[in-house]
Amino acid sequence: MRLRNWLPFIAAAVLFVTPLPAQQDLPKSTQERLAALARVEVLTIDDFKSLLSQAQSGDREAQYLLALVYGDGRLVPRDFDAARSWLLKSAEQGHVRAQAGLGQMYLTNVRHNDAIPNYGDADRWLRLAATQGDADAQFWLGTAYERGWFEAIDDREALKWIRKAATQGLPDAQFCLGRRYEDGEGVPQSNSLAASWYRKAADHIPSYVGGVWQAEVQLAYMYRDGRLKADYVEAYMWFAIVGSSVDPPTDDDMKRAAQHMTKAQIAQAQRMARDWIKRHTQQPESTAQAKAREN
């Protein structure tokens, strides 16, 4: 079984394993989007009234946040028409995250791999935000071309925008680029390059961001299926990480890997898994999140 979508044993190993890399940073645009969502979650009804007044006065940031409020449905009944209306007002004033959000909203009616009715509007707003460096817009623009949501599949455009988002550090895009290398879709097939991008995607916190868990699973699959160089310690580690994140936890694959390992190797793999889980459970506050909290 192989993990295909996000919307994410072998011969004996030596005891030496490459140290785990430093955690990857999320793109600035993604941090700002998460900070805005976090800010909306703690707004009061008085905050909403103040935000509405600012939005009506033409403040583009307030308009963007108000759109998120209507999309959230916590303080007011969920109203996607109102959300779209406020996003449009903000986007027309040049708010990049509003432009990205509006483009994504036009993709919400996608079913399977069919072209969407408003693909022209989706393309316009996503491209506008993507060319200004918004990583989420770049990813969704590439995904739309990859899936044929803009009438036809365009692998060149898909790869171009997904790679831009992946290079910025967006885990969804890194996972998608890894999948392309694994399958040889638009790029030379390479399991090592696939694993490299999966590792980048997996090495993010918070771990609930799209692409992170999917990358962890795919790395475990690649070791299980023998598509990466034999290394039971590394394989055990990834199975422990994935197994701990499902409910109920599972250790079947770990047990199979352990049959080919020494006690010292098992202890090392368990320690590596614990360290990884500990590091990736922590959620240090980003600059964008700190600013949102201060506001």
Image (cartoon, rainbow, N blue to C red):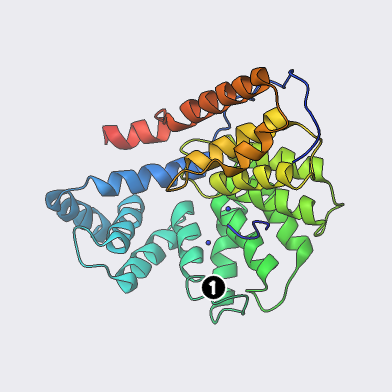
Q: Residue at x 66, y 37 (%)?
A: 199
- Judging by the rendered image, the residue that carries numbered circle 1 is 121
Name the secondary structure under disc 1: helix
Q: Pinpoint residue 157: horizontal percent, then vertical percent.
A: 74, 62
Q: Do we see residue 26 in this rendering?
A: no
Q: Pinpoint residue 180: horizontal percent, then vertical percent.
A: 75, 55
Q: Residue at x 54, y 64 (%)?
A: 125
Q: Do we see residue 220 in this rendering?
A: yes
Q: Pinpoint residue 63: horizontal percent, then vertical percent.
A: 32, 57
- Quadrant where the C terminus is found in the figure: top left
53 left or right, relative to 259: left
Outermost residue, front side: 259
Q: Pinpoint residue 33: horizontal percent, then vertical percent.
A: 43, 47
Q: Residues within 10 Å of mark 1 (few under 14, many from 20)?
A: some
Q: Residue at x 60, y 42 (%)?
A: 216
188 left or right, relative to 172: right
Front residue of this view, candidates 214 and 102: 214
> Quadrant location of residue 184?
bottom right
The amino acid beneath tag 1 is Asp
Front residue of this view, candidates 34 and 9: 9
Q: Residue at x 52, y 70 (%)?
A: 107
Front residue of this view, candidates 54 and 245: 245
